[in-house]
Amino acid sequence: MLTKIRKVKFQPEYKNPIYKVILECPNENKLYIKFDYTYKNKTFMPFEVNYNKEDKGAKLAWYTQEVEKMTVQEFLGQIAQKINKQYNFKFKEIN
C-alpha cells in the first residue's frame, strides 16, 4: 500500500463500524475516505471520497486501480485492518 494513514476517526458503536480516514498519497496528495463495514454483505462500502479537496462522491476504484493496483475491497480492508488493530476492535460474529 503506497498511502500512509495520517488521521483517523473510528466509530465502532454503530450497527456497522464507520471509518473516517485522511491518507497521504504519493506526490503529497491527500485522500479522505469515509467508509463502513457492512456485516450483512461482509464488505467495505465507501460513502465519501475526497481527493485533494475535490469531491469524488463515493467513487474510489479510479484511485485503487490506477495508484494502488488493487481492488477497493482490498484497499479498504488493509486500512480497516490497521485501524482495528490500533483500536483493538474485532468484527462481530453474525450467524
Image (cartoon, helix red, strand yellow):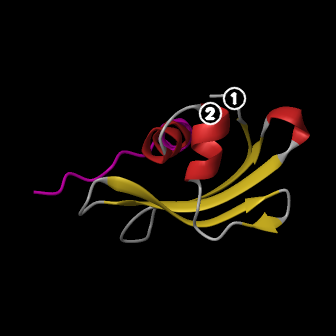
- The residue shown at (36%, 45%) is 90
Category of crowding for the residue at label 2, using alpha-carbon neighbours closer than 10 angstroms: few (below 14), some (14–19), many (at least 20)? some
- The residue shown at (43%, 45%) is 73
Where residue 39 appears, x then y in whole percent? Answer: 28, 60
* Labels 1 & 2 near each other (Cβ < 8 A): yes
- The residue shown at (20%, 51%) is 93
Category of crowding for the residue at label 1, using alpha-carbon neighbours closer than 10 angstroms: few (below 14), some (14–19), many (at least 20)? few
Q: Magenta segment range?
A: 80-95
Where residue 72 appears, x then y in whole percent? Answer: 49, 47
Per the image, the residue denoted by label 1 is 2
In the picture, the disc for residue 68 is: 2
Q: Quadrant of the N terminus?
A: top right
Res 91 visible: yes
**Label 2's element?**
helix
Asked whether 88 falls inside the magenta stretch, the response is: yes
Where residue 48 appears, x then y in whole percent? Answer: 62, 68
Q: Tell us which disc is closer to us: 1 or 2.
A: 2
Going from the N terminus, do you reach mark 1 or mark 2 first? 1
**Label 1's element?**
loop
Amino acid found under the numbered disc labelled 1:
Leu
The extreme right residue here reads 28
Amino acid found under the numbered disc labelled 2:
Glu
